[in-house]
Amino acid sequence: MNNIFYPSKNNNQKIHISVLSKGKDINAKDITIEYRKSKEEEFFNYINFDINKSIFMHQVHKDNIIKIDENNINLFGGRENLVEDTDALITNIKNIPLIVQTADCVPIILYCDESKSIGAIHSGWRGTVQNITAKTINLMKKEYNANPSNMYAYIGPYISQKDYEVGDEVAVHFKNKVFINNKWHIDNGLEIKNQMIECGLLENNIELSNLNTYDEVFYSYRRDGTQVGRMLTVGVIL
């Protein structure tokens, strides 16, 4: 499939990470729920995982984090059984895809090889201000004895700084910002990367995507407004 992206540093031997984009062949405004379902089923068949065993979140731009374990895993699966009011998931169960849905926000996959645990995070600017990534790392340390210095992090495609204009009330919270044409522009992904480093992750273990969701191949709320499509970022312990 030509609309799937993979991190360059991860070889998909210990963890599988992939990103389903929109593709260039259709306008986001023309996408129907049926079309989206068809493309998602095609995607999961291609990467050889079951969409009905994949854990989706009802994301709410907060800092709620849910641990997926043997006690609750049967409650979730596919788009029909979402983890409600959640923006991050953690687990140490193999072969369970954790899904982040985005259309300009930042998708993040964390993996600790030492503890064999994984995290999947949705972080818009509100999540970044609430430090959801650091909170997820700390919860992985608590639940799995994860070691930040032995973590790999993938910060997936998000809207680039040049296209992400914000008001003063948002910019005040960010260190990574520039003034363009008398407007603030923030780099949400770089802000998150710096938060990871403060938590003890090594810079060389953090992969920051240079793909911009404002480009046509991706879904972008800033570009297209409300539409049914979302990018899917998948993380799975193998």
Image (cartoon, rainbow, N blue to C red):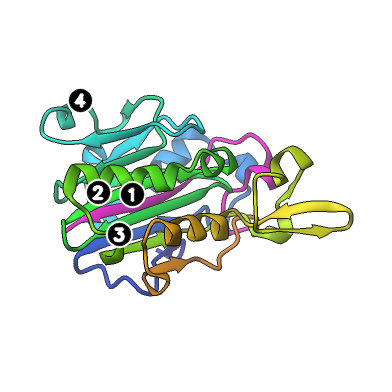
Disc 2 vs disc 3: Cβ atoms closer than 8 Å? yes
Q: The C terminus appears in which quarter of the rendering?
A: bottom left
Farthest right residue in view: 182
* Callout 3 secondary element: helix
x, y percent for residue 31: 56, 40
Residue with the mark numbered 3: 148
Neighbours of disc 3 within 10 Å: few (<14), some (14-19), many (20+): many
- CA gap, disc 3 and disc 4: 29 Å
Residue with the mark numbered 1: 137
Neighbours of disc 4 within 10 Å: few (<14), some (14-19), many (20+): few
N-terminal-most mark, 2 or 4: 4
Disc 2 vs disc 4: Cβ atoms closer than 8 Å? no
Q: Amino acid at mark 4?
A: Leu
Count of residue discs: 4
- CA gap, disc 2 and disc 3: 8 Å
Disc 4 vs disc 1: Cβ atoms closer than 8 Å? no
Q: The N terminus appears in which quarter of the rendering?
A: bottom left
- CA gap, disc 3 and disc 1: 7 Å
x, y percent for residue 34: 45, 35
Residue with the mark numbered 4: 75
Q: Which mark is residue 141?
A: 2
